Amino acid sequence: MSWTQTYTPVAGSLIVSALVAALPVVALLGALAFFHVKAHWAALIGLVLALGIAIGVYGMPASMAGAAALNGAAFGLLPIGWIVLNAIFVYDITVRTGKFEVVKETIAGLASDRRIQVLLIGFSFGAFIEGAAGFGTPVAISAAMLIGLGFKPLPAAGLALIGNTAPVAYGALGTPIITLAKVTGLNELALSAMTGRQLPLFSLIVPFWLVWAMAGFRGMVEVWPACLVAGLFFAVPQFVVSNFYGPSLVDIVAAAVSLLAMYVLLKVWQPRSVWRFHDERDADAALAAARKSVGAAAARRGPTAAEGLVAWLPWIILSVFVFAWGLPSVKTWMNGIFNPTWEVPFLHNLVHKAPPVSKVLAPEAAKYSLNMLSATGTGLLLSGVVSGLILKLGPGDLLRTYLGTLKRVRFSLLTIAAMLALGFTTRFSGSDSTMGLAFASTGHLFPFFSPLLGWLGVALTGSDTSSNVLFGNLQVVSAQQIGMNPILAAASNSSGGVMGKMIDAQSIVVASVATGQHGHEGIILRYVFWHSLVLACLVGVVVFLQAYVFTGMVPIPH
């Protein structure tokens, strides 16, 4: 028995239906931000509400709603939870072997200023990991590294989330843009180019924004050369590669150029004063006084080049594995070895999307793949094992470390599963499309709200790719109704979506796990929410101007 989605189930009113559809998300975010409910309980509350609305308001058969929730929970554990678990495992290995202390010293030798460190790790290095893997990996790794460098848990989590914005549309070797082209039928290079004429502006802004969020305006002005170099040397390659090559290597190339430019800058320039957190300044002053009293000779020498290389090996190995696992040819080869795929019972092709969300009445596929070999988390696991063996940890030590990591993230894995179950329930019930249609009904203001629709999609699904699948066609249909270029509208879904990445529940849970803040997800959400909303609105302003003023910026497919 099939079932067709309806988008105005409450009194035939789109606005009232959208308000009802938003209740699970409002309850989830409200429980986290204002009532300090633990994340796994907040997610379960949101899930129960989503199921109740899907069945009781939208008329979705209970068997389909349950199957959608179970499918989402399974996807939450693999690949998302699998990435988080194994990224933290790699970090735990470096801590257990003492090598992270050496990593800290090598970074401090390059720049002991916290503002420079957050640019290097939270922006440039995180962008490289985003380009290679995506799906939560950069937040997990960047936040864990910032904690290891001595950042407090809340800023480590919040800054890793803010830094992981501008690269997201081209994450995982361009997967969001490639998927958007497939969903909409629009030209892939044109979509890549259009997104590449929006996001470089924000790639230039985000490093300044990141430092300002941590150190204030004056602290940001003091390191403006570093902010400019990190952003400019990311933005220019991002524009060039996205416009003249395509989406697949944008982040990899741009992040590598940005890291290299920062390295060169720091060899010839350093900030006049070293910025540290308030509680660190007294400790630094005491240490400086102690070293002065015993003489400079007693000061601890820094690590040698060889020691630094050994300490960085786990992260080098991780980058190599993550990049290899992201290559389409490698994924195809691994999936050919092992990739059992099942059609989800009571769900596959039984739910039909209806116009205007889709062009025609279309069945919604629901398949689950147990792609253990090709999953990014497996590459992270192997990089951890290889790194541990090189650092002389025995099999027993590796197993004990892994079990310790699993114990530490067990509730977070439950949270991620519940969050994705909620997202899949809203997607298959059509309640998220109701919210999308409410945005799309804004008429000539739609170019401003178009990126906010993408922002909502990522906040709901946790993925720019999923947001593009969810709202890509809706963007095109809405654009055609008001005479807006569909290339601009579709690309704006992805560009606006990147700003929702820092507030989606999945990313917040990943950040909380990486920084040891389970139970404090609401505090992290409050830390980043207004940054996310303001940046998304700025994307809306840019798209509005491109739609009505700078129309020549929209590419014409060849």
Image (cartoon, rainbow, N blue to C red):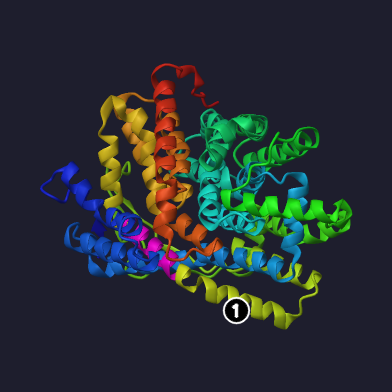
Residue 266, percent across and down? 76, 37
- Vertical relation: 92 (above or below) 364: below
Q: Which residue ends up furthest to the left in the rendered image?
A: 11
Would you say residue 472 is visible in this rendering?
no
Q: Which residue is mark 1?
A: 403
* Quadrant in which residue 448 is drawn: top left
Which residue is nearer to you in this view: 222 or 268? 222
Q: Position of 203 compared to 19: left or right? A: right
Magenta highlight on residue 421 = yes
Q: Which residue ends up furthest to the bottom in the rendered image?
A: 396
Instruction: Name which residue lies at 51% across and 57% down.
Output: 511
Which residue is nearer to you in this view: 22 or 297? 297
- Vertical relation: 313 (above or below) 206: below
Stretch of the chain drawn in magenta: 414-427
- Amino acid type at mark 1: Leu
Of the 4 image quadrants, the one containing the C terminus is top right
Q: Secondary structure at mark 1?
A: helix
Instruction: Name which residue lies at 63% across and 39% down.
Output: 250
Instruction: Name which residue lies at 51% across and 62% down.
Output: 80
- Vertical relation: 40 (above or below) 356: below
Residue 421, percent across and down? 37, 64
Of the 4 image quadrants, the one containing the N terminus is bottom left
* Quadrant in which residue 522 is drawn: bottom left
